[in-house]
Image (cartoon, rainbow, N blue to C red):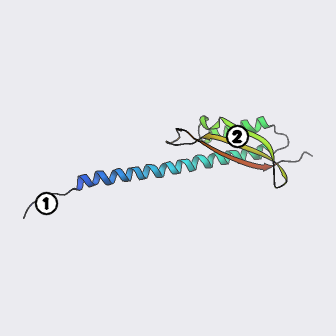
Amino acid sequence: MPLERGNAPAEFVMVSALLVALVLGIMQVIMVGYVRHSLLAAAAEGARHAGLADVSPEAAIHHTRDLVMASLSPNYAGDVRVDRSEVLGIPSARVVITAPFPALGLWSVGGVLEVEAHAPLERAR
């Protein structure tokens, strides 16, 4: 009976390389989703804060930046804007966060990710 030699080591290398690439790709998609969700949650909370009657836009920007820095990185808290808008005829506060797109983990190689949130303005009594 002749000795049979297999290609198991070569097949293992080829299959494991594809598997590692697939796992890294899935992890990156999850990372982008996490960053977008964190920015959107911070923008929504910042809009609710900006909608209060006794809160200035600068205080709302500071609050939103603190939330972004707590959940992500200071690099993502650079461009936060607060202004007034109208949604369905209701005066609202709008918070817009523009952050780098996370292309390699949390590092960006270009591109931006922009989220915005609205909250109704509180009436002063």
* Residue occupied by mark 1: 4
Q: Residue furthest right?
A: 125
Residue 99, horizontal then vertical, whole percent: 62, 40
| Residue at the spot 44% in from the left edge and 49% down from the top edge | 24
Query: Going by the image, does 1 lie left or right of 23?
Result: left
Nearer the observer: mark 1 or 2; the answer is 1
Q: Amino acid at mark 1?
A: Glu
Query: Going by the image, does 15 lie left or right of 107?
Result: left
Q: CA distance from mark 1 to mark 2?
A: 66 Å
Q: Amino acid at mark 2?
A: Thr
Residue 109, horizontal then vertical, whole percent: 52, 38
The quarter of the image holding the N terminus is bottom left
Q: How many marks?
A: 2
Crowd tier of the residue under label 1, counting other residues whose Cα lies within 10 Å: few below 14, some 14–19, many 20 or above:
few
Sequence-wise, the earlier of marks 1 and 2 is: 1
Between 77 and 116, the one nearer to me in the picture: 116
Q: Which of the numbered marks, if any, corresponds to residue 57?
A: none
* Residue occupied by mark 2: 64
Tell me the quarter of the picture where residue 51 sits: top right
